[in-house]
Image (cartoon, grey):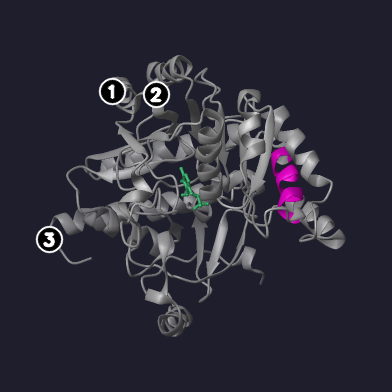
């Protein structure tokens, strides 16, 4: 039986021994046993830490347990794991070369494709991680304007470098001294922060919608997006869209194209190469000189395989009409989950775009109920997250959806029991 044929059996006592052994070994040689957003901490303890493989919308942990993947590697996997067209393109490039003294021709092909695909883009630069892309956008904005201050929304995540990491350990005040803060969707607060930055305002960094971990998601108010555009036009600052998490999941172009607002610079990563390590900075001609003058690079930034994967990913997103498909599947997921919450008489908020939803239980400020829900859904074969938005991939089928809804129904039952102070 292949992994694809193995049914995702619902059981309360899934094997965990291989994962436990790996965790034990990791604790000896990896600080904390794990770090960053994959640290076991934010996930309920029942979650596996180590995963063995993925195919389509399914993944398997190291003990062979199968899940429908609703986290998609926290965003990179958009077409599904091991998408055949992407894998074939990556393999063809790998047979020629990957990490070389200079980039392969596919770098130009990809830059041309990005410029054709994303409305505001006149040029493209490529890197590895989302943090590379957001940091480079800020560096270019400063290089172009000769100013220092960047405005960010309070609580927004833009990466793990010292200037933007949400944890203060190891950072200094100097790392944040050139940031100003506004409240997402509150134009007056951005205007106020811009006024405080005055002549020193280099840019305003903003995500396509408010997707701060652990909070209900908030779609952008188009008037807020237009107001930021006007503020940047009036001050000469760069409007920087952090499309790292949403890019190519909501629209085949920048996520603000449907809103009608184009940034000057945009940061991309995650979904652009369906799981291969790649990031991009896209920009307008007005910022081309700044982009040319900054020194940004990395030993692996010009690797050709991820670029070939990105060309294939963007092509497949278009050929498969994948964004509309994720929207449809995400809408069906939302309808199913909201109906279940009502049937269990559990007040919830289900927020964000259908393809990137997030569920919270009313009054559950410490995420206790969300953790009960997630852990039970995981045991039922649906891998989702109690504190982070979920991701629907284009590989998800009706069978996957049915399995997820079976698992979430059991998960709501577990929450109801917890609330009734009964054992689960
Ligand atoms: N910006 C946003 C909106 C993100 O969601 C992330 C990653 N979660 C980043 C930037 C940083 O990306 P990376 O982890 O690839 O550095």
- The residue singled out by tag 2 in the image is 199
**Is residue 145 rendered to the left or right of residue 168?**
right
Residue 312 inside the magenta-drawn segment:
yes
Q: Residues within 10 Å of mark 1 (few under 14, many from 20)?
A: some
Of circles 1 and 3, the one toward us is: 1
Q: Which portion, as a residue range, is magenta?
A: 305-315
Asked if 305 appears above or below 424 in the picture, the reply is above
Q: Nearer the viewer, residue 28 or 282?
A: 282
Disc marking residue 351: none
Place residue 4 in its image quadrant.
bottom right
Dominant secondary structure (helix, strand or loop) of the stretch shown in magenta: helix
Say above or below: 277 vs 394. Answer: below
Query: Relative to 203, does residue 261 appear above or below in the rendering?
Result: above
- x 71%, y 30%: residue: 115
Q: Is residue 309 left or right of residue 337?
A: right
Q: Residues within 10 Å of mark 2 (few under 14, many from 20)?
A: some
51 or 264: which is nearer to us?
A: 264
Q: Earlier in the sequence, mark 1 or mark 3?
A: 1
Which residue lies under the disc numbered 3? 421
Q: Which residue matches tag 1?
A: 192
Q: Is residue 57 visible?
A: yes
- Residue 274 picture location, percent across and down: 64, 50
Kindly tell me whether residue 246 is visible in this rendering: no
Q: Mark 1: which secondary structure?
A: helix
Sequence-wise, the earlier of marks 1 and 2 is: 1
Q: Residue at x 64, y 56 (%)?
A: 298
Q: CA distance from mark 1 to mark 3?
A: 48 Å
Find out if the beta carbon at label 1 lies less than 8 Å from the nearest ligand 1 atom: no
Q: Nearer the viewer, residue 392 or 314?
A: 314
């Amino acid at each position: 039986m292949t992994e694809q044929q193995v049914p995702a059996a619902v059981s309360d006592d899934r094997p965990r021994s291989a994962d436990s052994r790996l965790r034990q070994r990791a604790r000896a040689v990896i600080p904390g046993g794990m770090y960053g957003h994959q640290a076991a901490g934010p996930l309920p303890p029942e979650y596996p830490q180590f995963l063995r493989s993925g195919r389509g919308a399914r993944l398997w942990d190291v003990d062979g347990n199968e899940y429908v993947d609703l986290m998609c590697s926290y965003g990179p996997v958009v077409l599904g794991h091991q998408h055949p067209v992407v894998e074939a393109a990556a393999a063809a490039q790998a047979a020629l070369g990957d990490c070389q003294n200079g980039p392969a021709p596919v770098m130009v092909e990809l830059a041309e494709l990005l410029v054709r695909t994303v409305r505001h883009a006149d040029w493209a630069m490529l890197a590895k991680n989302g943090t590379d892309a957001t940091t480079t956008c800020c560096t270019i904005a400063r290089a172009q304007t000769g100013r220092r201050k960047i405005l960010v929304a309070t609580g927004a995540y833009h990466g793990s470098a010292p200037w933007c990491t949400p944890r203060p350990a190891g950072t200094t005040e100097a790392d944040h001294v050139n940031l100003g803060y506004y409240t997402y969707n509150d134009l007056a607060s951005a205007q106020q922060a811009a006024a405080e930055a005055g002549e020193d305002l280099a840019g305003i960094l903003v995500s396509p919608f408010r997707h701060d971990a652990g909070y209900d998601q908030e779609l952008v108010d188009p008037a807020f997006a237009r107001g930021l555009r006007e503020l940047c036009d009036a001050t000469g600052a760069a409007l920087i869209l952090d499309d790292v998490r949403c890019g190519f999941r909501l629209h085949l172009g920048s996520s603000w194209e449907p809103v009608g607002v184009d940034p000057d610079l945009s940061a991309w990563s995650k979904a652009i190469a369906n799981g291969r390590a790649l990031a991009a900075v896209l920009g307008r001609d007005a910022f081309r000189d700044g982009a040319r003058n900054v020194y940004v690079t990395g030993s692996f930034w010009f690797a050709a395989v991820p670029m070939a994967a990105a060309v294939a990913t963007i092509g497949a997103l278009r050929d498969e009409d994948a964004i509309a498909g994720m929207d449809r599947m995400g809408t069906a997921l939302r309808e199913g989950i909201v109906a279940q919450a009502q049937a269990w008489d559990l007040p919830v908020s289900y927020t964000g775009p259908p393809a990137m939803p997030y569920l919270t239980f009313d009054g559950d400020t410490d995420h206790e109920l969300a953790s009960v829900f997630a852990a039970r859904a995981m045991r039922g074969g649906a891998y989702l997250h109690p504190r982070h938005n979920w991701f629907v991939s284009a590989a998800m089928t009706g069978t996957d959806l049915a399995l997820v809804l079976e698992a979430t129904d059991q998960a709501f039952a577990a929450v109801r029991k917890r609330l009734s102070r009964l054992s689960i």
